[in-house]
Amino acid sequence: MKRTAASEQRSAIRMPGAVRRMRWWAGALLALGCAGAAHAGTPELPDWVTQAAASAPLPAAWRDAKAVYLLEDTLLTVQPDGKAVERYRAVVKILRPQGRDAARPMVWFSKDEKLNSFHVWSIGPDGHHYTMKDSEYVEVGDESWGMLYVDYRAKVAAPPGADPGGVVAWEYEQDLPSYFSEDRWDFQHREPALHSVYEIDLPPGWHQYAVWARHASVQPTEVTPNHFRWEMSNIDGIDLTDVPLAPAWAALAGRMTVHFAADPLPEGDALWAKIGDWYYGLAAPRSESGTDIVSEARSIAGDGDFMAKLEKVADFMQQQIRYVGIEVGIGGWQPHPAEDVFRSRYGDCKDKATLTVAMLDAVGIRAAWVSLDDRRGVIDPSMPTLFGNHMIAAIEIPKGYEDPRLQAVVTTKSGTRYLIFDPTNPYVAIGQIPEYEQGSYAVLAAGADSQLIQLPILSPKADITERTAKFELTPDGTLKGDVAVIRNGARSDDWRGTLAMDSDKEQRQLIEKSLQQDFSSFTLGTEKAENIRDLYKPLELDYSVTAPVYAKSAGALLLVRPRVLGSVAEALDDKPRKYPISFDGVGTWTDDFDVKIPPGYTVDDLPDPVNVDVGFATYHSQVKAQGDTLHYQREYVLKKLTLAPGDYPTLHKLESAITTDENSDAVLKKQ
């Protein structure tokens, strides 16, 4: 029920600088070690560092924290010409060895986000002061999946004295891109923060509008005319380590986005529409089609109806246009011209969305862009922002047109129906959308029809995993049989991707890994997969397996588990739940297993049927004895993507019933 790396066939549009500064480059940091060359002694530290380091005792509630932000301070200064310069400061105290990761300074920059200065200081646990030299910083590049070249780089520091009891501080100043008119205050971290400040200094007559997510709004103080300051203290951290079924961390963290402009700013839905229209103006000119695109699109689409044309264009986009990203400057946001993407046969998510728009336009179908974040819940409807990491397409459905394959449909405020399509994922058929996008909020960039939309959650019956098997049990407890697994819907993208890309050996290892959850020892026999790349047919996987000592002998009895393979149970903990519960996706799972019992044995006892309905899910199973065969049948239907923390006890009840059923034995008695 979990996604694997094989499904990560997508990438990011560029993230705003205020977000990037929170991305820690773990690999580079591990390679740095400690900067022993930093000069020790007692060089003078800035007052704001020493004052923060001398802060009052920390709240008792943070006694288990790994580190704490003593101070975080951001100042954004906007010039009359619109140019914005950001100065950022942080002071982190390390409390435990695991807290060192929070005290590794870094800053991202590019040609459009020029880095003006970067300074790092530290105070060792023994009180020694250190100031790092410019020559001691290491510069690393962006290593995002599928990116050939990105002009973003980061300066990274590994200061001395970064041990429990030590303090690390850093400050940088950089220009914001001229095309940004918003900034983010990410005041909540994995570690708690003692004091956090955000200021914006605007030219006379300019306007600011602050929106909040995951936190009640805080009113600013106007320090001087048009210079606003927000302050917060004692901000708890969000540590999701070992939290089962946790949402994306960024879907929980409190943050503020401030929009600024010389003209009055719209609010709410009007601001979402403005953001969508801004992106439409950036992307639409890039979708203009030349004769090559028009000719190819018409040749591919043919003369079929709306859905027939979509399937053919979608297949071309998913299978013929490789994912390769090249981003320089505003190219992190603006797609390459569709002509270039078509000619070179590669592009990133926004490039693929743009070529999709161009090709569909060539055959008379209108489409637009959809900006989202593939981590469900990160985009908050109450917080209009450019923030997101992915771009897909919305295809206008003709009025009155119906087709049962059109499942991922959104209806806008104007009544227009759009089919949501992700051309970046090559293993999810058009008509559906990947499970990690379902239920997310997104910005439809469609000119006058631009607006915030919520992507659909498909029916559990649209995503079905069916397992059937016939086994024979021998008197010594050995189990032999043939298994067939059929996967329908978007959830099959993991397996399709793995089976399509891996070698025969790796494919067998994938099946063996899944069987290790059910058998202490086994031998995988023949195996085959069908319809791996035919997205409009179910993915079929067939294999044979032999498991010695599957049944346990107890004198004249044999104990056998009717639920032979395939677990749907989730591992939970007994801690009080304070965060929402998040599932990968809704769906239906069915099992139908026959186990032929050995000659000379009869059924002595069977597990009781299980019937649980908790509203957001149902689970039904039963075991029957039919002649010389045990027949196990069950169905699990998960209907909701997210649950409130208060639903955790109910989820425990469900998972307890599932776990008991999955591990129950039938008893066979020797005659």
Image (cartoon, rainbow, N blue to C red):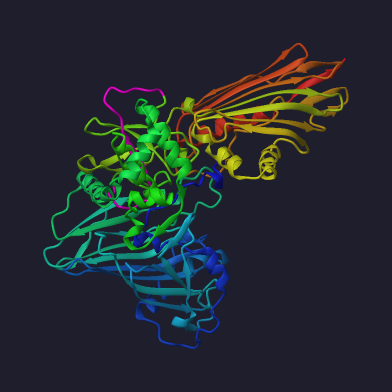
Q: What stretch is highlighted in magenta?
A: 383-404
Whole-percent x, y for residue 522 in the image: 77, 36
Whole-percent x, y for residue 173 in the image: 33, 73
Residue 624 to residue 617: above or below: above
Closer-to-camera residue (538/567): 538
**Residue at the limit of the structure toward the top, as seen here:** 627
Residue at the image point whose x is 49% and y is 46% from the top:
9
User: Which corner quadrant holds the N terminus?
Assistant: top right
Whole-percent x, y for residue 597 in the image: 80, 19
Give the dominant element type of the magenta stretch: helix, strand or loop.
loop
Res 531 seen here: yes
Residue 112 to residue 284: above or below: below
User: Which corner quadrant holds the C terminus?
Assistant: top right
Residue at the image point whose x is 73% and y is 14% from the top:
625
Closer-to-camera residue (186/545): 545
Relative horizontal placement of residue 208, taking residue 509 as reference (left or right): left
Residue at the image point whose x is 75% and y is 18% from the top:
605
Q: Quadrant of residue 594?
A: top right
- Can residue 387 be found in the magenta stretch? yes
Res 216 seen here: no
Residue 409 to residue 376: above or below: above
Relative horizontal placement of residue 200, taking residue 592 as reference (left or right): left
Residue at the image point whose x is 43% and y is 46% from the top:
375
Whole-percent x, y for residue 509 in the image: 69, 43
Closer-to-camera residue (358/152): 358
- Can residue 388 be found in the magenta stretch? yes
